[in-house]
Each structure stands twice: as C-alpha cells, then as structure tokens.
Image (tube, rainbow, N blue to C red):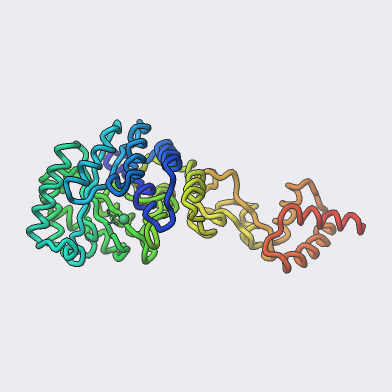
Amino acid sequence: MSEQDKVVIFDTTLRDGEQSPGATMSHAEKLEIAGLLDEMGVDIIEAGFPIASEGDFEAVKAIAQQTERSVICGLARANFKDIDRCWEAVQHAQKPRIHTFIGTSPLHRAIPNLTMDEMADRIHETVTHARNLCDNVQWSPMDATRTEDDYLCRVVEIAIKAGATTINIPDTVGYTAPRESAALIAMLLERVPGADEIIFATHCHNDLGMATANSLAAVEAGARQIECTINGLGERAGNTALEEVVMALKVRNDIMPYRTGIDSTKLMNISRRVAAVSGFAVQFNKAIVGKNAFAHESGIHQDGMLKNAETFEIMRPEDVGLTETNLVMGKHSGRAALRSKLADLGYELGDNQLKDVFVRFKALADQKKEIYDDDLIALMQVGEAEA
Ligand code: KIV
Ligand code: ZN
C-alpha cells in the first residue's frame, strides 16, 4: 500500500474525552494515558485545552516534554490569547501542533455575534497568527456539518491560504449520516482551491450512534485523519471510538484499503486504563473492548467456536490484546462447551457421566446468570459424593 493510503489517527481522549461531565483525570493519569497512546502508535495526541485551566496547561506542557514520537496538539479558540497560551504549552514537544477553531454554522455564528465577513477576517487573522508560531496548524469550523456549503468552502479556503496544514471537519452534534459525511468531504476537495495540499480530518460525535460509520465514510471520500477517543469517551454520547475505526480498517481492509500505524494488541489494556482513570465503565456489549465482545454463551455458538473460531468471531481476541475467547457458561450453553470447560478444569468425562452432570448444570443455570469455574467444580464434587 502507498503512503497515500495511511490514515492518521488523532486521539482526543485527553481533550474532548475529558470534557465528558465527570471524566476529569489527574495530572499523573493524563501523563500515563499519553504514554500509552504514544506507545500504541497514535500519530497525534490532543493533550488538552491549555487556556481552560492552570491544570490543563501544566498537563499539556508535561505531555509535550515527555513525548518523543507522537505529535502533541493543544486546542485554542479563535483569539490570540488562547493561541499564545496553547503555543506556550505545546512548544516543548518534539513535534508540536496548534489546533484552533470557531463555530461557523448559523447557530454558532450568532454566539459571538459576528457577521460572515467579520468571522472570515477573524479566521484569517488567527490562523495566520498560529502559523507564525508553529509550522503545524490545524483549523476546525465547529459545527461544519450544519454550516452552509458556500460559506464552509469560503472559510476553509481562507484557513488554507492563511497556512493551516490540516482542516478538520467536525460533526459537533453527531447530526450527519454516512452518505452526507462522505459528500461533504468530496465537495470540499472538489470546490476549495488548495484542498489537495492539506489533510482533511473527520471529527464525529455519536449522538445518533453513527460516529464510526460517518468517520469511515469521510475517509472513503478522501479524509486522511480520523479524530477519536479511547472507548468513545466524550461529551454527551461521546466521540468516534478509536478501537472501532482501527479494527474496522484492519478487519475490512478488503473494502477499505487504508492503514493506520496503531498496534491493535494494545487496545484492551488502554481501554481498561481509560475506563479506570475516567471512572466511565465500558458497556458489556461495546464493540471491540466490551467484556462480551469475545464471549459466547449459547450452545450453538459455543459448539461452533470449539470447532472453528471463525464461525462466530471476525477477529482474533489476540489482535486486540486478549489472550483467549471467553466461553461463558450459562443456561444457553450446550454439552460440547460443558465437556470442554470441565476438561480445562481437569475432569475428563464419559458420555454417561456428562449426561448426568449436564442435567445438574442446567438446573443450576436456571437459577444463576453465569456459572463460574467454582460452580462447576462444586457440581462435580456433589456428583462424586453421590456416586
Ligand atoms: O466537536 C467539535 O466541534 C470539537 C471542536 C473543538 C473540534 O470538538
Ligand atoms: Zn468534539
């Protein structure tokens, strides 16, 4: 695959993710997560919003100082004070980036009460200022997916001319749908002069549960940076989940021939660490990293899995950092799984013995959600005592 097929992974767990109400992380926790992101191969780490607080500033600065491989990015609103503060923090990085943004949709333009022309001037001035400080500047028209096409093209062109090297297209309120997400990137690539010289990024929120699909659709239309967070952490329903886009591009590389630099075997560990430090538990059935993502209880599935794992798994647990598939014993489990589980526990059973134990197992399973190894051992011991 050529260099052109690389999709840059921009992680914003420490900025947009931390904006989830209640997800605040300590200084030490942020440094730990940044280290894990860097180790996993994330290209760009958005480490925080330096003007937001003294703590955010210190965390971005410390992450900038400790990181050697990933680009370290800080967020700034469209004013010189924010941008200067951001630069003060990220300038310590081997590879710094300033990310500046302003809301461009009619609803967002009304907040600072700027006319379209005034906002266009503000974008020109602030991106120029950021570029005078740093060679690597990202600009975002917040709420891009609800901004008029003509105005979006106009402001994106201004930002490119002022020196932005990445243009991020945020779906700030998770409003778009895959076809529309792709059409927007295609429209910008076609209509904006200079668009082929910069990288387009996609930044999706998950309010309608379409963030991953919208991000992948944008990539298929020409975006080459995906903005995402571990476990999809983020405001309201969260952001695009990093683990989902990475594994989708890996597993369905046949139809989406793009590569990321992520070592997917590190996904499970970082997911658990982010859940622990943010206090946001991962839902059991969460794609890729949920407790049940590689677990099977029903008899038909367990039987299939014991014969050939590909029957009910499209990726190997090892590919995301798990050691093995989890065959959960419960009332839907069948004889094959029970035999295999008991063999793992050291009990090799003949057919008649298995028949007896299976009856007792089903009776117990009707009373309990999950049957643990200790329950099975107890079942075997009762059987041995009765024999
Ligand atoms: O969702 C959004 O619009 C953002 C911007 C600051 C990029 O997070
Ligand atoms: Zn966002």
- Nearest the viewer among 157 and 234 is 234
In the displayed structure, does residue 103 sit left or right of residue 65?
A: left
278 sits left or right of 236 in the view: right
Front-most of residues 257 and 359: 359
Query: Quadrant where the C terminus lies?
Result: bottom right
Give me the residue at 36% from left, 42% from top: 260
Q: Residue at x 51, y 48 (%)?
A: 272
Residue 43 visible, this angle: no
Nearest the viewer among 202 and 135 is 135
Percent of width and height locating residue 32: 45, 39
The residue located at (81%, 52%) in the rendering is 349
Locate residue 257 relative to residue 195 in the image: left or right. right
How many discs appear? 0
**Residue located at (68% from left, 61% from top):** 370
Q: Quadrant of the N terminus?
A: top left
Quadrant position of residue 352: bottom right
Q: Which quadrant of the picture is home to ligand 2?
A: bottom left
In this rendered view, identify the residue nearer to me: 287 or 87. 87
Q: Is 212 positioned to the left or the right of 274 in the image?
A: left
Measured as percent of width and height from the top left, residue 188 is found at 17, 55
Judged from this view, the residue extending furthest toward the front is 54
Q: Quadrant of residue 61?
A: top left
Quadrant hosting residue 175: bottom left
Q: Position of residue 220 (x, y in %)?
A: 29, 53
User: Would residue 152 be visible to someone looking at this image?
Assistant: yes
